[in-house]
């Protein structure tokens, strides 16, 4: 079995005396208490990643955790207490960040389609920065800001026309993508922004995609944005902030993403002497390998051609394989014997969709009904994308902290599920 960086000797997830342990808590014990499936996140891993990122920049950066990667209040509160800010893409995420007591001066509001109400909420909260993605949005923001008597600090998110060489569905920086304002148009937009009432242009922002595993696309994109920033400064638009987005990739299987030290060295080389406040919006890099999805084997079924391991988690709990053909390492919670033979199996969920396949032809040690398995690297874009498809109960989340754990999103009951809906009066 290959080992993502959270099983390669890191203390947060390891086999101890034959059983998978997260920090000091046995995964089987959590399953006993919470039931399966459930997500578990390691506080220690999150903390180590946050500190490693900050250390790479000598503490001179604002790391706004991309809330869309994992928006659990416990996770946000934990990162916020360490000093992280938050990158938001909706009013819901703004409310989560505030509920997690992350200070407004560490909040960046991103997103290509913010509504008038959302812009109003961001102004009312007095967020650090609003990233503007179109001229129409800029005009609307100025109108809303005038009405509420607040000044909006804005960055223009530019589209640098760079291919991030990642999955097409998570690439955001090519000129045909819906994100940002074309590099060539950006100066015009900034000149206009300077004249608009209640708008204070403070910087530029860029985010070219997610799960980027080489430095080259970052270097091209950042260089273009920095050249633009210098050109704008030379014409008297004194921008002081640079938001370089997120997107730093992680290891799921055998990827070799750049180290955070190399990433930071690149950024520091490109920005040397510019006296810029740097902000980042990493999501996956912080949380991806902090989490696992724990599931129980329901049945093992042999067909002529294949062996199916049917588990109690499904595509509604972890969508990444169905949506992005993503690979998640699967490990048994009880350590397999070292000589256990590996056999190719299809690990599938109970949902009535052929897409509900976590892994096809995966080499795994023997598994039987009742065994627990963990899907690794599930801390980002996992629980947050879950749904109640097939009327399955929304998957719960657990946070581990040393020797203790807490359920940070309980599994709803069936009554709670039904109470979300109404039968219209004419049918009563
Ligand atoms: C999704 C997103 C991020 C986070 O991306 P990661 O790959 O998880 O780091 C950051 N900024 C913006 C604008 C995003 O849309």
Image (cartoon, rainbow, N blue to C red):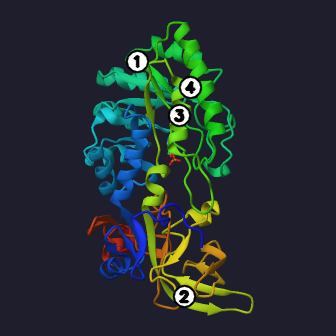
Q: Residues within 10 Å of mark 2 (few under 14, many from 20)?
A: some
Disc 1, ligand 1: is the CB inside 8 Å? no
Say if mark 2 contacts mark 1, CB within 8 Å. Answer: no
Residue placed furthest toward the right: 305
Between circles 2 and 1, the one closer to the viewer is: 2
State the residue in front, 372 or 35: 372
Say if mark 1 contacts mark 3, CB within 8 Å. Answer: no
Residue, disc 1:
200
- Return the x and y of residue 265 as percentages of the image width and height: 53, 34
Taking the image as shown, residue 231 lies to the left or right of residue 45, namely right
Residue, disc 2:
367
Asked if residue 39 is positioned above or below residue 51 in the image, the reply reads below
Disc 4, ligand 1: is the CB inside 8 Å? no
Residue, disc 3:
265
Q: Earlier in the sequence, mark 1 or mark 3?
A: 1
Asked if residue 337 is positioned above or below residue 259 in the image, the reply reads below
In percent of the image, x 38 and y 54: which residue is there? Answer: 46
| Residue 135 visible | no
Which quadrant of the figure contains the N terminus? Answer: bottom right
Instruction: Describe the element under mark 3 as helix, strand or loop.
Output: helix
Q: Rounded to the nearest whole Å, what is the CA distance between mark 1 and mark 4?
A: 25 Å
Instruction: Describe the element under mark 4 as helix, strand or loop.
Output: helix
Residue, disc 4:
270
């Amino acid at each position: 079995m290959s080992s993502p960086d959270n099983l390669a000797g890191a203390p947060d997830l390891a086999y101890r005396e034959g059983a998978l342990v997260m920090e000091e808590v046995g995964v089987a014990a959590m399953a006993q208490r919470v039931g399966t499936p459930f997500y578990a996140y390691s506080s220690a891993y999150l903390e180590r990643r946050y500190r490693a990122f900050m250390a790479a920049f000598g503490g001179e950066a604002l790391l706004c955790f991309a809330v869309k990667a994992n928006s659990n209040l416990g996770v946000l509160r934990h990162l916020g207490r360490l000093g992280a800010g938050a990158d938001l893409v909706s009013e819901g995420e703004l409310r989560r960040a505030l509920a997690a007591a992350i200070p407004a001066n560490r909040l960046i509001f991103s997103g290509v389609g913010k509504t008038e109400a959302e812009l109003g909420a961001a102004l009312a909260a007095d967020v650090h920065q609003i990233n503007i993605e179109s001229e129409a949005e800029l005009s609307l923001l100025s109108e809303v800001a005038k009405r509420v008597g607040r000044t909006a600090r804005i960055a223009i998110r530019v589209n640098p026309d760079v291919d991030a060489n990642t999955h097409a569905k998570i690439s955001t920086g090519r000129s045909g993508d819906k994100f940002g304002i074309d590099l060539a148009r950006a100066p015009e937009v900034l000149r206009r922004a300077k004249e608009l009432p209640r708008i204070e242009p403070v910087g530029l922002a860029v985010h070219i995609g997610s799960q980027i595993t080489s430095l080259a696309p970052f270097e091209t994109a950042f260089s273009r944005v920095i050249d633009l920033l210098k050109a704008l400064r030379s014409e008297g638009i004194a921008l002081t902030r640079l938001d370089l987005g997120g997107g730093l990739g992680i290891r799921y299987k055998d990827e070799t993403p750049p180290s955070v030290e190399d990433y930071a060295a690149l950024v520091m080389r490109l920005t040397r002497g510019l006296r810029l406040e740097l902000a980042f919006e990493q999501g996956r890099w912080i949380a991806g390998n902090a989490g696992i999805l724990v599931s129980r084997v329901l049945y093992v079924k042999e067909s002529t051609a294949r062996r199916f391991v049917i588990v109690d988690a499904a595509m509604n709990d972890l969508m990444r394989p169905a949506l992005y053909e993503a690979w998640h390492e699967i490990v048994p919670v009880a350590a397999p014997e070292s000589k256990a033979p590996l056999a190719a199996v299809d690990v599938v969920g109970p949902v009535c969709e052929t897409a509900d396949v976590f892994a096809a032809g995966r080499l795994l040690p023997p598994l039987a009904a009742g065994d627990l398995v963990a899907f690794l690297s599930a801390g980002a874009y996992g629980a947050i994308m879950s749904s109640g498809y097939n009327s399955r109960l929304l998957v719960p989340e657990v946070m581990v902290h040393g020797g203790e754990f807490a359920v940070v999103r309980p599994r709803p009951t069936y009554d709670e599920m039904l109470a979300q809906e109404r039968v219209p009066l004419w049918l009563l």
